[in-house]
Amino acid sequence: MRTAIARLAAITAGSLILTACASKEPLDYLPESNAYILINAEKAYQDAGSKRLMEVAEKFQTNAAGKAKGKKMYIGLAGFPSAQPKVCGVMIGDDSFSKAALEDLKTAGGTVSKVDGRDAVSYKQPGVQAPGAEMTFATLSPSAILLTNSPAARDLMTNTAKRKSPAAVNHALFRSANSDLGIHTFTFAINTEPLLNMAGQQINMLKGMNPKGAEALQKMKVAKIVADWEQEPKVTVSLVVDDKEGREALAALVNFGAQMMKANPNADKMPDFVKGIQAKAGTDAVEIPVVVPKEMADKAIAALEEMSKDLPKDPVARQQAMQAAAIKMLGR
């Protein structure tokens, strides 16, 4: 009897473990981070302006077949703002996404490998030599891919899925960014405390000019950026401060900085939409909306479309041609 009970207990425990492993969602691998970048590619292809941007971006891909189109991308920058943060990401698409994405990367010159038994491709943008520039894309399921920039990042994602490291899905900053992703194409959210700690000397200097603004800046814990492009590109920066007085002081500080910017001798060269930037204290954060005029955005896209024509097929030559064209365009 005892043997039968022990055997039953072992089978039950084994089944629970297998069920727990099998039930993992892609986002269970994403670690808690100081900064998150989230992209809603489905919405990007639905909105007229961002659709043009996505299509011209496809033309710039280096020898890639471009068959794979993801739906959502979630990236955590663990350890940010260190010089080399661990880049941990999850890309999600339809049931053919993973296979098509790896094929695209192989066509673009990526190196085929295996990561923890999973099909993977490592890829580095031609001409880029920065540490951590090579990304590894590993199949998690037919519809999901894990992306990392180092073995340490891969270990972190594995430990997160095993619940040995804190997960993004339980992190208030990520949950806030993810809720924004439901209605926006692009979301960037950052825990500002580490950055402010690094800027202690500059903040002390600011206290001499604007003590209330400096105090409010130190109270800021989170900054978020959301962006969309339907008819014209719209960006909203949100600086989260808990108390009303702090939000008002921080908005005044931002507007003071905008006034100083307009007083610059070269301010006449700035676009009108930049000169018109105005911060307002909202119910939860200081909001800074920016709208790029449609005509200006359309002109920039047309220039990119022109750049994409007749690019060399060689990856390095293609990258060099793109950089030269970008410098020329910015110098106009």
Image (cartoon, grey):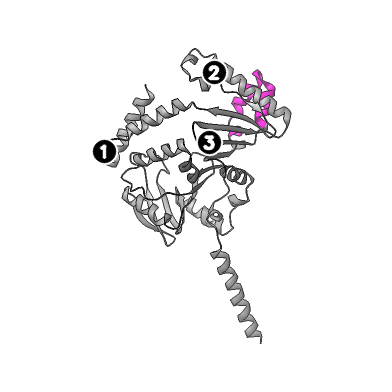
Q: Does 48 sit above or below residue 151? A: above
Residue 173: % across, % down: 62, 43
Q: Nearer the viewer, residue 34 or 109?
A: 109
**Label 3 element class:** strand
* Amino acid under disc 2: Met
Note whether residue 205 is visible: no
The answer to which quarter of the image holds residue 25 is bottom right
| Type of amino acid at the residue the image marks with label 1 | Pro
Residue wearing tag 3:
227
Given residues 311 and 75, the one toward you in this image is: 311
- Label 2 environment density (alpha carbons within 10 Å; few <14, some 14–19, many ≥20): some
Is residue 4 visible in the rendered image? The answer is yes
**Mark-to-mark CA distance, 3 and 1:** 32 Å
Which residue is drawn at the image coordinates 44% and 39% (left, top)?
51
Location of residue 203 with respect to 226 vertically, above or below: above
Q: Main secondary structure of the magenta part?
A: helix
Q: Please provide percent x and percent y for residue 210.
A: 66, 20
Mark 1 and 2 residues: CB-CB less than 8 Å, in contact?
Answer: no
> What element does badge 1 sit on?
loop
Instruction: Residue under label 1, please give it.
Output: 312
Question: Closest to the observer: 287 or 46?
Answer: 46
Residue 114 among those drawn in magenta: no
Left or right: residue 180 compared with residue 85? right
Sort mark 3 into few (<14), some (14-19) or many (20+) by Cα contacts within 10 Å: many
Identity of the residue drawn at 46% across and 56% down: 143
* Cβ–Cβ under 8 Å for marks 3 and 2: no
Q: Which residues are magenta?
A: 195-218
Does the stretch in magenta take in 202? yes
- The label nearer to you, 3 versus 2, is 3
Q: Residue 313, image x and y in percent? A: 26, 41
